[in-house]
Amino acid sequence: RWTPITYSVRYFDKAGNHKATDTKTYGETFTLRGNPGWTAAGYTAQGWARSANQTSRTHTFGQSVSNLATTQNANVDFYVAETPNPYNVRYFDKAGNHIATDQKTYGTTFTLRGDPGRTAAGYTAQGWARGANQTARAYTFGQSVSNLATSGNFDLYVAETANTYNVRYFTKDGTHIGTDAKTYDAWFNLRGNPNRTHPAYTAQGWARSAGQTSASHAFGFWTHNLATSGNFDLYLAET
């Protein structure tokens, strides 16, 4: 009389770490184990493969099988087959307006996009931030990165800092009086009358060029954003 053999069905994670063993008998129909939840972050389990580090399965989870071995005490090994997940890297300007989207694959190294040239006037781009309206960057433009997300979307925003500029003050004939450093978008008062007027003349305010009699800005004028960078020059206007 013949006695059916027994054999072991051994289960491993993708990397080859042993997790479980079931003993089966020749002639017996049974179902393979389901998804064991051993999948690495950023990957999706596809089923069972017959060797480690595979992306394609040979058997589905829970598949009905029989007679996987014909030798007594043989081992039949199964490994979780996994595929890397795709995810989206989405780029936005500082205010949150969408610029572009790149699809990436988990486990793949790539470079972030460079400066998109979407910086607001009076500001300088610093890199990519993880939220809108930031001044500090989390990543540089063109930085080499990988595995930013295990799935879904990973959002990056242009980080910008306000530029500084100089407000320079001069007498009517172009003699330098003083310089004040200002920051774009910051409000301030222009300087008052410096009392550097020529004899027999009356100061009218600040003009944009030398030798003027009409003022473009009053003394102490409340203002902002006179320049996006560099120098903004004002001269005493006199009559």
Image (spheres, rainbow, N blue to C red):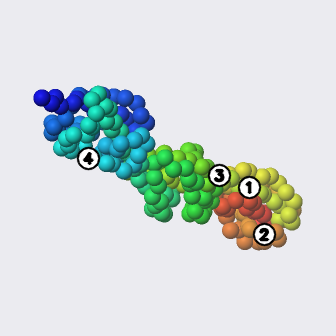
Q: Which residue is mark 3?
A: 183
Q: Under tag 4, what secondary structure?
A: loop
Mark 1 or 2: the one toward you:
1
Where is residue 38? Give x, y as percent.
34, 35
Q: Earlier in the sequence, mark 4 or mark 3?
A: 4
Quadrant of the image occupied by residue 192 = bottom right
Where is residue 108? Give x, y as percent.
51, 50
Count of picture labels: 4
Identify the residue at image location x=49%, y=52%. Answer: 156
- Residue 209 shows which numbered tag? 2
| Nearer-the-camera pick, 237 or 62 | 62
Q: Is residue 35 left or right of residue 169?
A: left
Kind of residue indicated by mark 3 = Thr
Kind of residue indicated by mark 2 = Ser
Task: Give the alpha-carbon distance from disc 1 to disc 3, as whole Å.
Answer: 9 Å
Mark 1 or 4: the one toward you:
4
Kind of residue indicated by mark 4 = Thr
Q: Which residue is mark 4?
A: 60
Q: Which residue is mark 1?
A: 166
Going by the picture, which residue comes out furthest to the left?
Answer: 1
Identify the residue at image location x=46%, y=61%. Answer: 101
Q: Earlier in the sequence, mark 4 or mark 2?
A: 4
